[in-house]
């Protein structure tokens, strides 16, 4: 699910169906559906030697609504093939108005998804009232015995039919299960208006009979801030899309609220089953929301996120597609106990050719670059510009600058937070694809940026630098011949 502030008000339907394979703004090596709307990653899982990605999907158009679970499969988290829709709303069922976000596990050898089902109810019965919808949220289960995870069978009734009694909650969704000892535990995103977000904690032995324990962790906001918001996610009164997992000798909590994604690292008190944060930060300082993690075949923790469309609804609805999945990121804990991330190393196999020097060009908005330099008393500058059509001057896409006198590292004139500022060296990586830019600085700072242009041809990206002598610039090989617009298998 996503905050109401990110939901569009539907306009008129497009007059014609566009040819998505010819849209230069459509990415060539990010995962996105064959057409229509995508948002949150759901239940990514490695099963039967394949990576399965499920995601929030509207089969009826490039706008939010009528949430299904789309499905794609990959041997390496890079090359994807679409499969038929995995979950659809059941008329008369607890999910009749939408199959919202959730998770996938293997329970007693059986692939199992737990997700939030919603149905419209009067406002006084709703757990989700955001100014757009009044939904009753319940936690539902489906299982699958088919090798490619097609043909899911739903339990007829929710496994958690209502929030804990006595709590006037601001939401009740996006279940995240995890195992500790002989028990399954389950986090559910929630919160209390005027108080802050919280993560509700449940426990079960069989994954179906769940007992509520207490909040795993609670937020704290200024109560007065709630009065100006219809949607409690915007005010911080509700935390959605929680994810919780061990990493090295710490535990990590990730949640989405106030149009941002926050992370916390800390310790789990296993006696009280409460999480105590030691460090916190923003996961991505750009167009990035509702992430979800999984383990890969080697036990690495992989992060996925939804990259939304900041352009107007009329534009992306007419384009016939909206939203994409981020590239896979590998998570770690650094020496200070903070969360670190890097791009999946396997993406190197998509690189084609390499330019080196102080300047270069990425052709057709489909490439990557990286560089490193010491952070000393010498000023550094890195500039990415979009080469516009005709004689129009290039326009800025991203500017990175190191100002040694002030000891400040800036991206687009915004200072990287002091706790994220590298002390001795700069390691910079960027991936450009159609209309998205994913940037990483020293494994501690990420920014995802959307950019758009006119015309039927993707422009080149001009890269220049000062004080940086080892730019490495590559083209990226597309993962399909038609921008993943082929029919489902």
Image (spheres, rainbow, N blue to C red):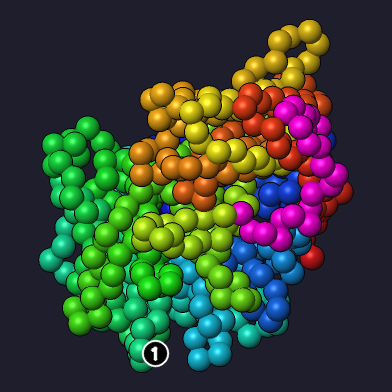
Find residue 19 and report its horizontal and vertical position in percent.
Answer: 81, 37
Q: Nearer the viewer, residue 365 or 441?
A: 441
Residue 471 seen in the figure = yes
- Position of 173 compared to 192: left or right? right
Q: Nearer the viewer, residue 197 or 319?
A: 197
SS class, disc 1: loop
Find residue 135 and report its horizontal and vertical position in percent.
Answer: 35, 55
Vertical arrangement, residue 306 with respect to residue 308, above or below:
below
Disc 1: which residue: 206
Q: What residue sits 20% from the left and 82% below the top?
A: 271
Residue extending furthest front? 377
Quadrant for residue 21, please give it: top right
Find residue 340 and report its horizontal and vertical position in percent.
Answer: 47, 56
Residues drawn in magenta: 343-363
Residue extending furthest top? 391
Quadrant for residue 12, please give it: top right
Task: Look at the image and say whether residue 93 sits in the magenta stretch.
Answer: no
Task: Look at the image and say whether residue 355 sits in the magenta stretch.
Answer: yes
Q: Nearer the viewer, residue 186 or 418?
A: 418
Vertical arrangement, residue 127 with respect to residue 105, above or below:
above
Q: What residue sits 81% from the left and 11% below the top?
A: 390
Q: What residue sits 65% from the left and 40% below the top?
A: 371
Quarter occupied by the C terminus: bottom right
Find residue 458 and report its horizontal and vertical position in percent.
Answer: 78, 29
């Amino acid at each position: 699910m996503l905050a109401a502030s990110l939901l569009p008000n539907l306009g008129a339907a497009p007059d014609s169906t566009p040819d998505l394979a010819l849209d230069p703004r459509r990415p060539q090596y990010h995962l996105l559906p064959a057409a229509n709307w995508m948002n949150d990653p759901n239940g990514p899982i490695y099963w039967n030697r394949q990576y399965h990605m499920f995601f929030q999907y509207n089969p009826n158009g490039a706008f939010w609504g009528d949430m299904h679970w789309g499905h794609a499969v990959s041997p390496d988290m890079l090359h994807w093939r679409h499969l038929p829709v995995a979950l659809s709303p059941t008329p008369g069922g607890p999910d009749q108005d939408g199959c919202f976000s959730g998770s996938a596990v293997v329970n007693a050898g059986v692939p199992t998804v737990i997700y939030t089902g919603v149905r419209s109810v009067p406002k006084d019965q709703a757990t989700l009232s955001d100014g757009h919808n009044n939904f009753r949220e319940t936690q539902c289960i489906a299982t699958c015995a088919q090798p490619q995870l097609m043909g899911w069978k739903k339990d007829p009734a929710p496994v958690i039919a209502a929030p804990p009694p006595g709590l006037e909650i601001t939401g009740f969704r996006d279940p995240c299960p995890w195992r500790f000892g002989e028990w399954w535990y389950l986090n559910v995103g929630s919160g209390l208006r005027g108080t802050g977000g919280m993560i509700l904690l449940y426990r079960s032995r069989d994954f179906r009979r769940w007992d509520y324990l207490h909040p795993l962790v609670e937020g704290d906001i200024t109560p007065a801030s709630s009065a100006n918001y219809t949607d409690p996610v915007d005010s911080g009164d509700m935390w959605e899309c929680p994810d919780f997992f061990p990493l090295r000798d710490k535990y990590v909590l990730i949640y989405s609220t106030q149009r941002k994604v926050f992370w916390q690292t800390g310790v789990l008190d296993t006696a009280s089953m409460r999480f105590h944060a030691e460090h916190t930060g923003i996961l991505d300082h750009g167009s990035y929301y509702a992430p979800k993690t999984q383990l890969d075949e080697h036990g690495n923790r992989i992060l996925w996120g939804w990259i939304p469309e900041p352009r107007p609804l009329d534009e992306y609805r007419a384009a016939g597609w909206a939203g994409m999945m981020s590239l896979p990121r590998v998570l770690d804990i650094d020496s200070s106990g903070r969360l670190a991330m890097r791009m999946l190393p396997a993406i190197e196999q998509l690189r084609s050719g390499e330019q080196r020097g102080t300047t270069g060009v990425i052709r057709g908005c489909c490439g990557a670059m990286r560089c490193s330099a010491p952070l000393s008393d010498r000023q550094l500058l890195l500039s990415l510009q979009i080469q516009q059509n005709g004689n129009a001057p290039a326009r800025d896409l991203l500017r990175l600058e190191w100002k040694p006198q002030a000891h400040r590292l800036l991206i687009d004139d915004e200072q990287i937070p002091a706790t994220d500022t590298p002390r001795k060296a700069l390691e910079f990586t960027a991936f450009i694809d159609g209309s998205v830019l994913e940037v990483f600085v020293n494994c501690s700072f990420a920014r995802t940026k959307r950019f758009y242009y006119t015309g039927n041809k993707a422009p080149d990206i001009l890269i220049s630098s000062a004080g940086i002598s080892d730019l490495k610039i590559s083209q990226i090989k597309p993962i399909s011949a038609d921008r993943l617009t082929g029919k489902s298998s």
